[in-house]
Image (tube, rainbow, N blue to C red):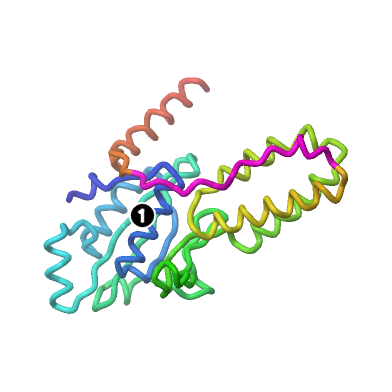
Amino acid sequence: MRPTTFLVIRYKTLLMQRLLDSVRHGYCHYTAAQVPAEKALAFCQKFAERYEVALNRDQRAYRKRLGKGNARLILADLAKNGTLHWFLLVSDGDHPARQMEPLRDALESSTRIRVDDYELLRLPRDRNHGGGVRLTWRMTNQRFDTWRAAVRQLARSPRAEQEVQAVIQSLFKTPGFGATRVQVGKLVATLAREWERAGRDPAALILPAALPYVRRVADDDYTVIDWFKDQEEMKHGQSEAA
């Protein structure tokens, strides 16, 4: 794989899935930051040379057999502001990133991977589904508390019946991972309880059955060179408009 063929993720759910995949496959130490468009290609080249993030599957397997670690580089353009978010994830074993980067443990509660207001964590799996632990995404505590305060305030608002469907639609845009589905269910229950307590018209509260599970999303064939060209075109268009 050449550095210029690294894929750029443009959708939050896809980024969350790929980060979860990496941690599940043992890439449990990470660092993350941003890089501006004008430095993106050189950055990818540097990381390919320094951390061997462009190795193919056989090359990674060989390093693993030798007891060495491997690294993955995940790129994402979610902010649409001319910068790339990047995540460097490293597996167990000897690897130069352990000496050269401020790696954090993705499975420690104080250093979890975050994407916007969501965090990746391990939770117990129900015994009926095999027990053990599972990796999932959930809203951060701060985000969940903000939502809970918002639905309570909505139920008491004089414009509650006019605004409730927009709030529900926004809430149900939450990516449907296991833990986020539980959180959305709790928020819906809070809304229904506060709605009834406020004496609102039950017919005005139309709730979906449940937040759907997120579907597996295929990789988007959009490379870092494609992204860089798009940034240059946008910059050129802005300069002409000025």
Q: Is residue 195 left or right of residue 125?
A: right
Between 235 and 1, the residue placed more toward the observer is 1
Total marks drawn? 1
Vertical comparison of 77 with 95: above or below = above
Q: Main secondary structure of the magenta part?
A: loop
Whole-percent x, y for residue 41 in the image: 29, 47
The residue at the point 42 percent across, 44 percent down is 77
* Residue 233 position in % (x across, y down): 38, 28
Q: Residue furthest front?
A: 128
Residue 94 vs residue 186, the one in the foreground: 186
Q: Secondary structure at mark 1?
A: helix
Q: Is residue 232 above or below residue 58?
A: above
Question: Magenta stretch containing residue 206, yes or no?
Answer: yes
Q: How far across and how far down the image is residue 26, in percent?
A: 31, 70
List x then y, in percent, for residue 238. Answer: 48, 26
Q: Is residue 162 above or below residue 38?
A: above
Q: Which residues are magenta?
A: 200-217
Q: Give residue 163's quadrant in the image.
A: top right
Q: Which residue is mark 1?
A: 18
Q: Amino acid at mark 1?
A: Arg
- Mark 1 packing: few (<14 Cα in 10 Å), some, or many (20+)? some
Relative horizontal placement of residue 13, taking residue 73 as reference (left or right): right
